[in-house]
């Protein structure tokens, strides 16, 4: 028996799955790591903590699978996107903490780019907006604040998103590479050519010498070397940004299929095939994957805070003791009691793109209970996603027949039902919700010939529960009107 190791390095934890030849999970483990908030708009990770979380999860997953690590035939990596690292090529030591995708510290730099009239060019080349969400201004900030531009120009530094950093560590510093799905989130890659763009590098003043090579998502990126708990020589045959990996893991291989992941944030992606679709309603165009000679693209909408809102209710306000309690608490009331929660804790993403927006709780009265706030929080998460789907449908000129859902928060049946009611669309939840890691594993299996094509991979996907709309149009109209009024106040 051969096995696939899938590493899902996320925003708050790392999950590792051991998959057998049927893509069934034989063992799994997750390891959380600390988040750092040096200032209100700053979010950072310690790179050493990220790597240690990977090692800990790898060791635990192998032990729970009760396999010999020498039987691992390939490794696939999925990762939090946009999070930015720069490290010394000789020592392998990062020159600064990783700047996380949620971080808004470069909002001013993005406004300067807009004031210079550069956003249309950036959008045309990358499919993205000038927003602190993306990697280029984060990399520029690190270089400026560590006074490292001369070292970067001399080729002594390496830039990477988390996939690149993990590959570097897994291969003992032998390989510096990324993939199109991650590179398409940096503001530095031309979406049409799938290569670093000279004009964009000049705009952001990023030295080409520090950039990784871009390889297809399914490739032999490198082989393990001196990784604790793993033998040398295991090939890394797949890398994908986490949201593209989830789209892949949901087997959304056909044009027009879509998924929504409920994780730290919420991410809605629609497969647009080999065509780059330009959004006119605030969405992004991105590379889904490149397998073989042809790239596959997607339309994407991102809400920066979804599951993170539940974590804040737990850790910040203390109204729940565990994330799982929010569904129980929200079911103690029949509605939100007039309370509206806008989860703009780190600004608003698509389709609003308001980096300076702040979270809002409104409609409080003496009758408001913890249950009302909990239910309103779930409603706020779903309202953000409804904004995304409305924008997507406006771009397409058609409604979606259904959306596949995944991510940790999708276990919340009440959240899923509220989402189906607001979207007025069927939601399909798969039997296995670990679709991000499974997507990376599926791509890795494809890379070693364990599966021959996408169609054979599609047979491994199994639907679980479906959620159908239960509310009428009047309810939706009133809920959407109240939401839009609240959004205007952020």
Image (cartoon, rainbow, N blue to C red):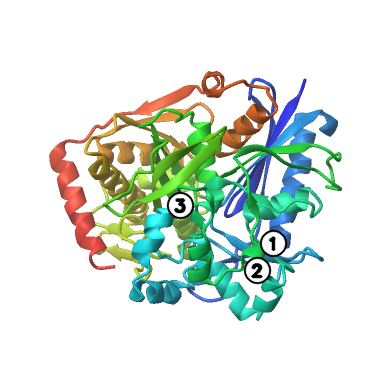
Left or right of 167, for residue 43: left
- Tag 1 residue: 47
* Residue 191 x, y percent position in the rendering: 46, 50
Q: Earlier along the polypeptide chain: callout 1 or callout 3?
A: 1
Q: Residue at x 66, y 33 (%)?
A: 444
Residue 167 in view: yes
* Residue 407 x, y percent position in the rendering: 50, 41
Q: Are marks 1 and 3 in contact (CB under 8 Å)?
A: no
Most foreground residue, 301 or 164: 164
Under circle 3, the secondary element is: loop
Under circle 2, the secondary element is: loop
Of circles 1 and 3, the one toward us is 1
Q: Is residue 24 above or below residue 400?
A: above
* Residue 383 x, y percent position in the rendering: 30, 49
Q: Are marks 1 and 2 in contact (CB under 8 Å)?
A: yes
Q: Which mark is residue 218?
A: none
* Residue 254 x, y percent position in the rendering: 41, 28
Dividing the picture into quadrants, the one containing residue 26 is top right
Marks 1 and 3, how far apart at CA: 21 Å
Q: Is residue 418 above or below residue 186?
A: above
Under circle 1, the secondary element is: helix
Q: Is residue 427 above or below residue 159?
A: above
Of circles 3 and 2, the one toward us is 2
Marks 3 and 2, how far apart at CA: 21 Å
Packing grade of label 3 (10 A; few <14, some 14-19, many >=20) is some
- Tag 3 residue: 265
- Tag 2 residue: 97
Marks 1 and 2, how far apart at CA: 6 Å
Dividing the picture into quadrants, the one containing residue 343 is bottom left
């Amino acid at each position: 028996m051969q096995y696939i190791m899938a590493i899902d390095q996320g925003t708050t934890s790392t999950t590792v799955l051991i998959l057998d030849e049927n893509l069934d999970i034989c063992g799994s483990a997750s390891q959380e790591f600390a988040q750092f908030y040096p200032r209100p708009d700053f979010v950072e990770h310690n790179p050493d903590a990220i790597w240690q979380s990977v090692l800990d999860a790898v060791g635990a997953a192998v032990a729970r699978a009760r396999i010999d690590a020498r039987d691992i035939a390939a490794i696939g990596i999925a990762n939090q996107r946009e999070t930015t690292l720069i490290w010394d090529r000789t020592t392998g030591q990062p020159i600064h903490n990783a700047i996380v995708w949620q971080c808004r510290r470069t909002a001013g730099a993005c406004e300067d780019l807009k004031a210079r009239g550069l956003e249309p060019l950036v959008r045309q080349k990358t499919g993205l907006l000038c927003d602190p969400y993306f990697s280029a201004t984060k990399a520029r900030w690190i270089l400026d604040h560590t006074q490292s531009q001369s070292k970067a120009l001399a080729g002594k530094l390496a830039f990477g998103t988390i996939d690149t950093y993990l590959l570097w560590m897994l291969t003992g510093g032998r390989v510096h590479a990324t993939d199109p799905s991650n590179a398409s989130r940096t503001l530095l890659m031309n979406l049409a050519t799938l290569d670093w763009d000279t004009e964009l590098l000049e705009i952001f003043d990023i030295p080409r010498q520090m950039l990784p090579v871009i390889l297809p998502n399914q490739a032999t990126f490198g082989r393990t070397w001196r990784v604790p708990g793993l033998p040398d020589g295991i090939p890394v045959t797949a890398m994908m940004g986490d949201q593209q990996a989830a789209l892949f893991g949901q087997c959304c291989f056909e044009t027009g299929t879509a998924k929504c992941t409920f994780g730290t944030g919420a991410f809605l992606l629609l497969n647009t095939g080999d065509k780059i679709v330009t959004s006119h309603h605030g969405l992004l165009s991105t590379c889904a994957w490149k397998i073989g000679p042809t790239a596959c693209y997607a339309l994407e909408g991102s809400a920066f805070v979804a599951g993170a809102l539940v974590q804040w209710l737990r850790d910040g306000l203390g109204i729940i003791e565990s994330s799982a309690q929010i569904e129980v608490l929200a079911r103690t009331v029949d509605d939100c009691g007039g309370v509206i929660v806008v989860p703009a804790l780190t600004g608003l993403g698509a389709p609003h793109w308001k980096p300076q927006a702040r979270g809002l709780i409104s409609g409080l009265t003496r009758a408001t209970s913890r249950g009302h706030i909990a239910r309103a929080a779930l409603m706020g998460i779903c309202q953000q996603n409804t904004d995304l789907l409305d924008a997507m449908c406006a771009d397409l000129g058609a409604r979606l027949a259904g959306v596949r859902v995944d991510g940790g928060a999708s276990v919340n049946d009440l959240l899923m039902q509220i989402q189906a009611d607001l979207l007025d669309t069927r939601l399909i939840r798969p039997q296995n919700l670990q679709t991000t890691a499974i997507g990376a594993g599926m791509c890795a299996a494809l890379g070693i010939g364990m599966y021959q094509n996408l169609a054979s991979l599609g047979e491994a996907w199994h639907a679980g529960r479906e959620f159908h709309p239960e509310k009428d149009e009047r309810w939706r109209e009133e809920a959407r009107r109240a939401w839009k009024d609240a959004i205007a106040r952020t």
